[in-house]
Image: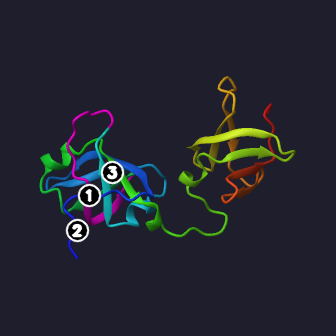
Amino acid sequence: MPDSPDPVKPQDAVEVGRILGAWGVKGGIKVKPFSADPQALFSSKRWFIEPSDAKPGQRVPALLRVVQAREQNDAVVATVHEVADRDAAQALAGARVFVPRASFPTLAAEEFYWVDLIGLSVVDREGTALGRVVGLIETGPHCVLRVQGADADTAEVLIPFVEAYVDRVDLGGRTIHVDWHADY
């Protein structure tokens, strides 16, 4: 069945990278993934594209159908049906890349996608609310949760996302239970 002329981005689409620009001379594109492990980009042959926030008026196709994609250093390089030459690929620089969450690879037990952790409440062992996860930082050996308190004047708390400090992640209850205190 052919694709619709104006594909609609799925409701569960997650932004997984940005197009850096052209790769090679035949219309390849280079994408900066938002994860150290870019499997989400490889999990779907359909990438939904939105213009860069920094480039008002940028015209991009709503959908890129991936022919081939592979890792190249800290990026992903891909060829897609909708881009025929280097100039067309370079015109996509800055565009946002989304894939359906449903197409992400299945994780092992006790593994989590960052997108699933952002927005979760964080509570300590005494049940005191420390705030909400607003982001994560990749440090190499492990990730660090960025937790913003409920009060806007509260400083951001950084909690290593390791077993020593994270007791349990309850995705259904939208809560991360930690062995941490706000005054650490």
* Horizontal and vertical percent position of residue 161: 68, 49
| Amino acid at pointer 2 | Asp
**Residue 63: numbered disc:** 1
SS type, badge 1? strand
Q: Nearer the viewer, mark 1 or mark 3?
A: 1
According to the picture, the residue beneath numbered tag 3 turns out to be 31
Q: Magenta part of the protein: which range? A: 53-73
In front: 173, or 133?
A: 173
SS type, badge 3? strand
Q: CA distance from mark 2 to mark 1?
A: 10 Å
* Horizontal and vertical percent position of residue 153: 67, 23
Q: Residues at badges 2 and 1 in contact (C-beta under 8 Å)?
A: yes
Q: Residue furthest right?
A: 126
- In the displayed structure, does residue 142 sit left or right of residue 183? left
- In the displayed structure, does residue 175 sit left or right of residue 23? right
In the rendered structure, which disc, 2 or 1, sits on the residue that comes first in sequence? 2
* Horizontal and vertical percent position of residue 27: 16, 55
Q: CA distance from mark 2 to mark 3?
A: 23 Å
Q: Residue at x 23, y 61 (%)?
A: 79
Asked if residue 13 is positioned above or below residue 178 in the image, the reply reads: below
